[in-house]
Amino acid sequence: MITAYRSNGEAMMLLVDQQLEALSPDIIWLDLNCPTREEDHYAERLTGIEVPTRQDLRDIEPSSRLYSDGKAHYLTTSLLAHADSRAPILTDVAFVLTDAVLVTVRYEDPRAFMLFATSMCRISGGLQTAHAALTKLMETITDRTAEILENAEVKGDGLLQQIFGTDQAISKRRPPKFLEKLLIEIAHHHRLVSKARDSLTSLSRVMTFLYTVPAVQADQEAKELCRSISRDVQSLSEHASFISSNITFLLDASLGLINVEQNAIIKIFSIASVVFLPPTLVASIYGMNFKYMPELEWISGYPSSLLLMIVSAVIPFFFFRWKGWL
């Protein structure tokens, strides 16, 4: 699917069977979302540049993600998609910048593209150049990443509350399965934040390259915006690292509490075995089959042995309570 955007934000669909000879001069952005090979060729004929295919984005080397060929500047970055779902992914997106038009090629749907497309009509004076559209799009992508990290921080606080709870909840025993479920939530949380960090690293390289593009250098407003975005990306990377360290703390805390709960269970069995050891000893003594035992003919021997077993069990129990082991 090819969507063309005019400088005022108006969008129009371009169909292969339309067979346009050239793009309208006021079209500054061509967005290719999951294009077919026919749509790739159609966009190439309209723009006069080579459009990266799905295989090109998949096979591209990290050192070849940013380059110029005289006709256009090619920038490929990894963006976070499906961030609001349980399975966020990184998808490679190509930005091809020419003097007249910006071409984006993507095979997923990062939310930043929809946000930018809907905000174009609200930009005062519209977007008059392709490089201005690219810098504004990068700003929207950065803002969306910041929103994702803010939501991740809120989710981290919620997980922390579930792990430790309030003062009243801390005094209550929680089954290990409850904490084991939290481990799964922490794993999903870590996956989102780690992919956001990878995306920010890729964005940082793109912004460094974009800043050196001659068209951006000649536009003071775009140049300042690139600097601002680069600073934002750097601060967001540091914030993502901070959230990642909090996730490590959440993981260690969950594993520690699971060990505490499991040790408490083992302690109960250990103390129970020690408490019932003296009664077992008494019962074993009087369960021996020797012919001559003083208590065998004793009328009160049976209740006395039962009383002795109870006393021998109660004494260790209260001793453990006095020591604070129970």
Image (spheres, rainbow, N blue to C red):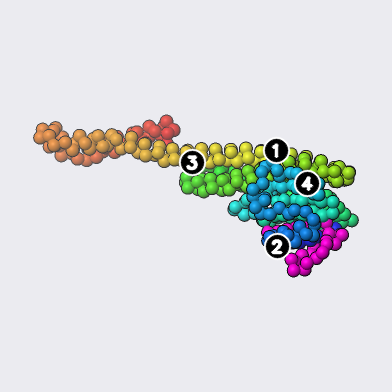
> Mark 2: few, some, or many residues within 10 Å (few <14, many ≥20)?
few
Quarter containing the N terminus = bottom right
Asked whether the viewer can see residue 136, the reply is: no
Q: Alpha-carbon distance for marks 4 and 2?
A: 23 Å
First-in-chain label (2 vs 1): 2
> Mark 3: few, some, or many residues within 10 Å (few <14, many ≥20)?
some
Which residue bears the numbered disc 3? 258
Q: Secondary structure at mark 4?
A: loop
The location of residue 224, given as percent across then percent down, is 85, 42
Q: Alpha-carbon distance for marks 2 and 1?
A: 42 Å
First-in-chain label (4 vs 1): 4
First-in-chain label (1 vs 3): 1
First-in-chain label (3 vs 4): 4
Which residue bears the numbered disc 4? 69
Q: Alpha-carbon distance for marks 1 and 3?
A: 31 Å
> Mark 4: few, some, or many residues within 10 Å (few <14, many ≥20)?
few
